[in-house]
Image (cartoon, rainbow, N blue to C red):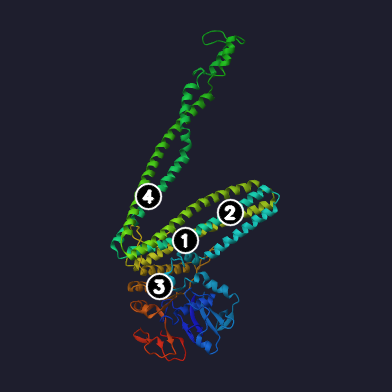
Amino acid sequence: MKIKRIKLSDFRQFHNKNNIIEFSTDNDRNVTLIHAENGVGKTTILNSILWCFYEKFTPDFENKNNLVNIDSLIQGINECEVEVEFLHEGKTYSATRRYQEATRSSFLEVFFIDNGNYQPIRSDKQLLNSVIPEEMAEYFLFHGEGISQLQSKEISFRNAIRDVLGFNLANQAIEDMEVIKNNWQSKILKNNAEESKYNKALTELTSAESKLKENQVRQKKINEDLNFLSYDKKDIDEKILNCKVLDANEIKKEIFQSEKSKDRRNDDLLHQEKQKQRLIQIYGWRVFGFELSEDSLDFIDTKTLTGRIPAPYDETLVNDILSSSKCICGRSVKNGSLEYSVIVNLLDRANTYEIKANLMKARSFAQVIGKEARSFIEEFSVANKKINDLQHEISDLEGKITNLNAQLDRIDDTHLKSLRIREKDISFNISRLESTLNNLMREIENCNISVQQKKREAEKYMPNSGETFKIQERIYYIQKLIDFSNNKIKTTENDSKYRIANFVNEILEKFSRKAFKVKMSNDFNFEMVREDGGIVAKSKGEKLLLNLAFVSALIRLAAQRSNAQSKFLQPGTVAPFIIDAPFGELDEAYRKATSHFLPENSEQLVLLLSSSHWRGTVGDEIKNKVGKEYVLISHKKSTQGMKPLDEIIIDGNAINQSHYNCAFDGTSILEIK
């Protein structure tokens, strides 16, 4: 999608009906520049497109209910409108939204333009959402302040990625499937009211699943709060590192290193604890059987054979004596005699083949138990020693961190003390939330166990009813779909996260003056890291550069997904990137870099610039990419007096952006190129 032109009629600062901007749709010269001082109409132009398409505004747009130009109202004109003409998939469309002051309401009309003929489209909102889905719009129509708020409480990188990937549709599908599943479970309860055990199990299952979901929602909220607090903590840490107190800077760096070492030791400790549990799972029962195995070997070797005829005098020997009626000593053994009876009784105690085989197996098994028990004790002792060593190291590091923090607190600097108070407050809240989260995760684990138990109980008592069986089967398959959908979202999200990080790194490698790379954490926050893995403190300019690079990566990702055939996620979109006040706190080098990579990574780029943003290297860097250029002229009824003319130099020509003694208060559009 590319915007061809926009027409503003009596909308906000734009008086009368001939306020038209033709945007560049050229593939090479894909940039449209609009120059204006603050308060003249840059933000209005950005918001006019957002309002025309979705009847919404950016958060910083003031007086949202005052849309009709003030001078127009004085002249009796009580309506305003915005028309946006755009190209999409080789066709031309027009979207017009009109606002009536009397009713304070607006209505939208969308047309397909065919050889100058305007053909109305009934499904106007559906068409606009297919061009730029509403949840993606805020990443294409961006205010500079919005860019600087990325990775804050208002906007998160994770939400941006999920919006551009079209997760809203998938999440809504998952919610709908949950509702359907619950409805089916309710139907089973109704159809099987007489089956008390099954009904009880199903009721308890529904309750357990509801409790699990409630806890998962709480877990998500706590993780989000922790994410915001962690960002605030990093911001405070950066401010302490960047403060001009040298001792504080060095101490804080040492604290960072000690905390990283402590984190590594904690990870090692967790690994050793898991190793210890694994040893218990594998060998634990053998330890309890160790003493039994020793006693068993003694019993087998000394007592088992007591009263038995020693090998080879076993069952075969006894039978041979009886059949020959003659003892091995030569004495006669006749049937019915006392000798015969005594020898027959020996059969009850004679060694058989089975007895000998079982004795050998028992001896072997007892020996194995004893050997593995000794191995377990050795490995368990090694693991315990490692755990004790790690606990001592962690304790030493905690003591070191405590001492370093005490040194930091003793530094007599007012600004540093205020930062430390804020840091401690954030750390306390993080600790409190982490404790709550740990308890909640244990509760979630118990809930999962309870859900599985209740499922087994429900299956055990499920009535042998055809209808109930079919509903239960549907519940089973819809749960499989829910699980598949959640896994698909997670996989796609992680894949896109790394693709975006790689693209941002490409930009930073070319243009950043520092040798660092971007790493996206598990909570979807970008961190700048050195080669040794240490986190880099970001300046305000670097934060803005990073966020602009991220938004460019988002737009590239959306364009790459515009032809996606996924039946699961919404396809991406190709749309103009419109930025109001993009360069903010960037220095000259970073402005030049941004002027280079923004046009390269946008199909159509519209920059709304004040003269302070235009000065310096921006014009020289971007001039070969500019296809259209305008200046917004501020008209004032008042006399000039000491007020400035707000002169701007473009291609060597001086243009006054403020005109005085005019017939109206408002803005007009001057085309430069």
**Of 481 and 563, the residue lying toward us:** 481
What is the number of callouts on the image? 4
Classify 10 Å Cα crowding around label 4: few (below 14), some (14-19), many (20 and above): some
**Disc 4 vs disc 1: which is toward the camera?**
1
Q: Hey, what amino acid is under mark 2?
A: Glu
- Would residue 567 be visible to someone looking at this image? no
Q: Which residue is mark 3?
A: 598
Position of residue 346 relative to residue 605, above or below, is above
Distance from the alpha carbon under mark 4 to that under mark 2: 37 Å
Q: Hey, what amino acid is under mark 4?
A: Arg
**Of 310 and 658, the residue lying toward us:** 658
Q: Which mark is residue 265?
A: 4
Q: Earlier in the sequence, mark 3 or mark 1?
A: 1
Classify 10 Å Cα crowding around label 3: few (below 14), some (14-19), many (20 and above): many
Picture coordinates of residue 82, whole percent (x, y)? 52, 81
Q: Earlier in the sequence, mark 3 or mark 2?
A: 2
Distance from the alpha carbon under mark 3 to that under mark 1: 32 Å
**Of 51 and 203, the residue lying toward us:** 203
**Disc 3 vs disc 1: which is toward the camera?**
1
**Disc 3 vs disc 4: which is toward the camera?**
4
Picture coordinates of residue 99, whole percent (x, y)? 56, 81
Q: Which mark is residue 225?
A: 1
Question: Residue 26 appears in which quarter of the rendering?
Answer: bottom left
